[in-house]
Image (tube, rainbow, N blue to C red):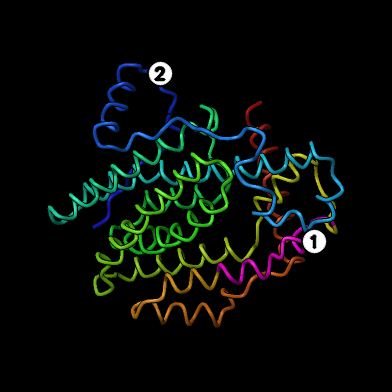
Amino acid sequence: MSHSIVNSLYLPHQGDNPSLDKTLQGSLRRKGRLAEPPSFDSSLPAWSAALYGLPHSKLFQQLDETKQHQIVKSCNNFVLTESYFIEKAGLAYCAKMITLGETTEIRQMYGLIASDEAVHLSWLAPYLDVTQRVTPQGKFIQHISNMIEVCDVNTLYFLIQTVLEGWGIAYYKTLGKSCQWGSLKATLLNILKDEAIHHNTGVALFSPERLTKQSELAIYDGIKSYLDILRVGAQNIVACCEQQLGPLSFDALVALFTAMETERSSAIKLHILKNIMLQPATAKWLAQLEIEGYFEPYSPVECAKIYREQSQHTAVASCVAATAAL
């Protein structure tokens, strides 16, 4: 069964209805899921530069402390914003899955997951200003949003819950353990517990025997998209560096990807993702993707080329949009 839903990532989230906000806080308190106000040492970044491999970069080493701090802050803002929007997209996802649930138990399960997503948003929102809450960054969240809108239920059981939520277990564990802000660390590790339940739900509900040719193709393309996101290295971290430093030369881009050990890091992530996706029904797809080289990370030179091409494409698109607006 297929059903479209509009997953607007730009919905406001600014607490402009005091009465509703009070009721929301009261509901969270009654359920025992009201988080303590953010508490952290403002002299420390949420995550250090080490999370991104930046200390190995000569470019980063040569910057003064202020500029280093600005780059790390940009990287941290990106990570927080991406986490926020994944949870925000989860609300629309659950609305769709509840509507299309084929049994009462499935609707119950997605009602509970929707509650988790709402709680996670309430925990993460205080770390972002109202502008950041309506400004999704990076292509990954847009890709996820599109899948939620157009894919059928069985496809989503695999692509969103089995794979994405499975990846979220490893991802939130890394973020939580390395976080230097006590309250945010606790929040991320609590989200991690819920991610495991969400992942297990997808594994329990995915039915390979019910896949149509169209949904098989959607899953195959979805897997390729996930793998490509990992193969190209930390493109968003490089973008954060350029945000503070201005455009880098091609050689500087290659050196930065090299310093961040993009091939080693991507290879580890690709291995983790492969294990998450590996099931009897998916083995043939993964074998074909392995033959096509999708489990091989790009080299620093290839990552730099891809980054430069995408940057140029974005710049051209912006110019076209600006011209059309005249």
Label 1 belongs to which residue? Answer: 254
On screen, 227 above or below 48? below
Residue in view at x 32 percent, y 56 percent: 198
The image quadrant of residue 17 is top left
On screen, 290 above or below 33? below
Where residue 91 appears, as percent x and y from the top left, is: 34, 42
Amino acid at the residue labelled 1: Val
Residue 134 appears in the figure:
no
Neighbours of disc 2 within 10 Å: few (<14), some (14-19), many (20+): few
Residue in view at x 61 percent, y 43 percent: 76
Give the residues in magenta: 252-269
Residue in view at x 37 percent, y 55 percent: 195
In-front residue for pair 179/316: 179
Q: Main secondary structure of the magenta part?
A: helix
In-front residue for pair 325/175: 175
Q: Which of marks 2 and 1 is nearer the N terminus?
A: 2
Where residue 139 appears, as percent x and y from the top left, is: 56, 50
On the picture, is 216 further left or further right than 49? left
On the picture, is 83 further left or further right than 50? left
Circle number at residue 16: 2
On screen, 306 above or below 297? above
- Circles 2 and 1: CB distance less than 8 Å? no
Amino acid at the residue labelled 2: Asp
Examine the structure image and report whether residue 266 is included in the region drawn in magenta.
yes
Circle number at residue 171: none
On the picture, is 100 further left or further right than 259? left
Gap in angstroms between the C-alphas marked 2 and 1: 46 Å
Which of the image's four quarters has the N terminus? bottom left
Residue in view at x 76 percent, y 39 percent: 244
